[in-house]
């Protein structure tokens, strides 16, 4: 083997090494990004569980099923979110939901209405925050899957094998002669799977209007039921 052949052989080895190094570097990046995405989903699910507690505080402040159903219609919700969770809470736990709210007003009815409005304001703010987090996760998911698609296109095993075989200058297959079926299996294993999130894993949060937009109708309903 002369110097030119040695140089070509060294170049082939270097190219193969770069392909392998790039593959694992990009795959490691995708795996880390997938873990980061999953961590965001876990945080979101935890925040959603906290939203259930805020809805329960709102329901407890209202105190009447008929009033709750009327208010849910005013808020354009198809059903009372987390209502079954609320109904299963023991009475002591329900009362504890409101212990951090200051009672404001000169009359009992006024203090009750203000309490309900305060719980709603906190609830609407929490829903808005959760909506923003949901949008960020959805955007992260979309970008992650775009990167996955680019990765799978860039590191298609069939194309890589064909390129390396062409470099060898003969019809000698890669890896000691992989059969067609074996190539397809290896190509499938090398691909990175897109991330899917079901509505159960990432439920969209309820959307509530800000307090200022519904304060008037809420007060009218509450006065009807509390008088």
Image (cartoon, rainbow, N blue to C red):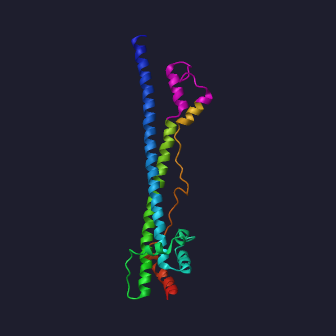
Whether residue 57 can be seen here: no
Task: Please provide percent x and percent y for residue 221.
Answer: 51, 83
Task: Please provide percent x and percent y for residue 90.
Answer: 50, 72
Image height of 72 relative to 8, above or below: below
Whether residue 104 can be seen here: yes
Q: Which residue is drawn at 54% across and 75% down?
A: 72
Q: Which residue is drawn at 44% across and 70% down?
A: 123
Q: Which residue is outermost to the right? A: 181
Task: Please provide percent x and percent y for residue 138.
Answer: 48, 54
Residue 21 is covered by the magenta coloring: no
Q: In this view, does 66 lie to the left or right of 211?
A: right
Of residues 92 and 152, the one drawn nearer to the viewer in this rendering:
92
Q: Residue at x 52, y 60 (%)?
A: 203
Please count the marks in the image.
Answer: 0
Q: Which residue is outermost to the top? A: 2
Task: Please provide percent x and percent y for residue 61.
Answer: 47, 78
Q: In this view, does 21 lie to the left or right of 88?
A: left
Magenta part of the chain: 155-182
Image height of 61 relative to 53, above or below: below
Residue 156 is covered by the magenta coloring: yes
Picture quarter with the N terminus: top left
Q: Residue at x 42, y 21 (%)?
A: 11
């Amino acid at each position: 083997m002369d110097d030119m052949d040695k140089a070509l052989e060294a170049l082939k080895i270097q190219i193969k090494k770069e392909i392998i190094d790039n593959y694992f570097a990009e795959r490691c990046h995708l795996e880390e990004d997938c873990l980061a995405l999953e961590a965001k989903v876990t945080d979101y699910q935890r925040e959603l569980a906290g939203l259930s507690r805020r809805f329960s505080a709102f329901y407890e402040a209202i105190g009447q099923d008929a009033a709750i159903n009327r208010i849910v219609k005013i808020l354009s919700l198809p059903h009372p979110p987390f209502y079954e969770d609320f109904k299963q809470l023991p009475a002591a736990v329900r009362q504890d939901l409101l212990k951090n709210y200051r009672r404001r007003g000169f009359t009992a009815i006024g203090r009750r209405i203000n309490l309900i409005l305060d719980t709603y304001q906190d609830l609407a703010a929490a829903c808005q925050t959760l909506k923003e987090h949901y949008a960020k996760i959805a955007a992260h998911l979309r970008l992650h899957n775009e990167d996955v698609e680019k990765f799978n296109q860039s590191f298609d095993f069939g194309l890589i094998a064909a390129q390396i075989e062409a470099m060898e200058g003969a019809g000698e297959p890669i890896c000691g002669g992989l059969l067609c079926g074996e190539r397809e299996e290896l190509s499938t294993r090398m691909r990175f799977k897109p991330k899917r999130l079901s509505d159960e894993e990432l439920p969209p949060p309820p959307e509530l209007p800000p307090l200022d937009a519904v304060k008037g109708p809420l007060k009218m309903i509450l006065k009807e039921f509390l008088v």
